[in-house]
Image (cartoon, rainbow, N blue to C red):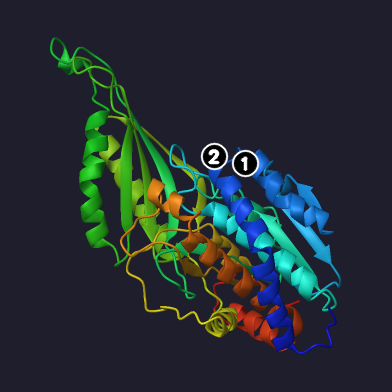
Amino acid sequence: MSSERQPQDLKNAIREAARRRLPEFMEMVRWLYHHPELSGEEKESSRRLAEPLRRAGFTVSFGVGDLPTAFVARRRRGKRPVLAYLAEYDALPEIGHGCGHNLIGTAAMGAALVLDEVAADLGGEIRVLGTPAEETLGGKVAMVEAGVFADVDAALMVHPASEDRVLSDSLACQSLEVAYLGRGAHAVAHPEKGINALDPLLALFSARDALMRQSRPGLRIVGVIREGGVRPNVIPERAVGHFSLRAPDRERLAAALSAFRNHARRLAASYGCKVELTLTDFAYDEMLTNRPLADAYRANLASLGVAVNDAPRENMGSLDMGNVSHAVPSVHPFFALVPQGLASHTREFAQATITEAGEAGLLRSVQALAMTGLDILADPDLLRRAREEHRESGRGRGKSEA
């Protein structure tokens, strides 16, 4: 295809190429569905997603960011801009692709292949970044910290949900392990000789509601008891809780985390225990949707006949894409896959990925991702506005000039 063709002609070609290649893309979705691999173990999933890109002329490297199942696939026809599509492909224990990562990974791969086929003369670089372990440690965070996004100008991905939405947001998140150490003894014959490590942990669970009420709106603290003793007639000498703290932004998260840790220490002193506090996994930043990129994506969806709901959300989780959005201008749209009320992280959600609804969602996602990628490659003003908005937000940590 020639870059002298009008953008609308190229977008029409993208739409047709995506339709033509939809059967092969759905074959990938189904393969991933039937061969789910857990976080950090996605050896075959990552290889399968990278192989069509390699055959199309992309240069593929594995093990980026010290993550064995992460990959970068590059197709360079000019130095700038660098456009990155993000692929996820880890599954959930016993559930499989209950978060739709088989659709997410395939949409990123498909958009890159279609855009490369149609807009080969536009220059710039198209990348697909294979980002593993989203469900556990947060592979994107590791990749941001390793500098994988240092020269990326824009990052795009999609996620299945119960509605079409472009303005996505998420909560900043940090996980914390709290281990109380007491002294064991016979709980009936010699209770005075023991120090019950479970008591301060239970008190910490009871204190959660008070801590949330005393904080600014939006704080969430959830947790589980990992260890709480071995027998009822033995005073627990060790008790372990795993907590997840979430807040609207990383500043409020840091304040809440400090208050929570201080309270855990006070309870340890009150009950005569020692306490060990360990941060687990990476901290997730809140998602910063880039408005110029979001506007372009929304316009492309509209041209496909798709209306979106961008009203403020009340219910949301956390995304490792949030850290990417602080580093580079980013969008993380959602597309409708399941009816309202059907929860993700369920077998029903996983099953929906290989239905007609999954196929329809994949098609419009590949089309909208590729069309927005075309806008980024062909319109320097869009990228300038995206960088400007990213810089002026005062919250982006990465480069905003190139």
Q: Determine crowd level at label 2: few under 14, some 14-19, many 20+ residues with C-alpha closer than 10 A.
A: many
SS class, disc 2: loop
Q: Is residue 87 left or right of residue 318?
A: right
The residue shown at (20%, 45%) is: 206
Rendering coords of residue 27 (x, y %): 62, 52
Q: Are marks 1 and 2 in contact (CB under 8 Å)?
A: yes
Position above or below: 348 against 239? below
The residue shown at (71%, 45%) is: 47
Q: Nearer the viewer, residue 188 or 309?
A: 309
**Image quadrant in which you'd find residue 401:** bottom right
Locate the N terminus by quadrant: bottom right
Rendering coords of residue 135 (x, y %): 50, 47
Locate the C terminus by quadrant: bottom right
The residue shown at (24%, 23%) is: 195
- Between marks 1 and 2, how big is the CA–CA gap? 6 Å
Q: Is residue 226 left or right of residue 32?
A: left
Whether residue 204 is visible here, answered yes or no, is: yes
Q: Determine crowd level at label 1: few under 14, some 14-19, many 20+ residues with C-alpha closer than 10 A.
A: many
Q: Nearer the viewer, residue 128 or 147?
A: 128
Q: Which residue is mark 2?
A: 38
Q: Which residue is mark 1?
A: 42
**Amino acid at dot 1:** Glu
The residue shown at (16%, 17%) is: 192
Rendering coords of residue 131 (x, y %): 63, 52
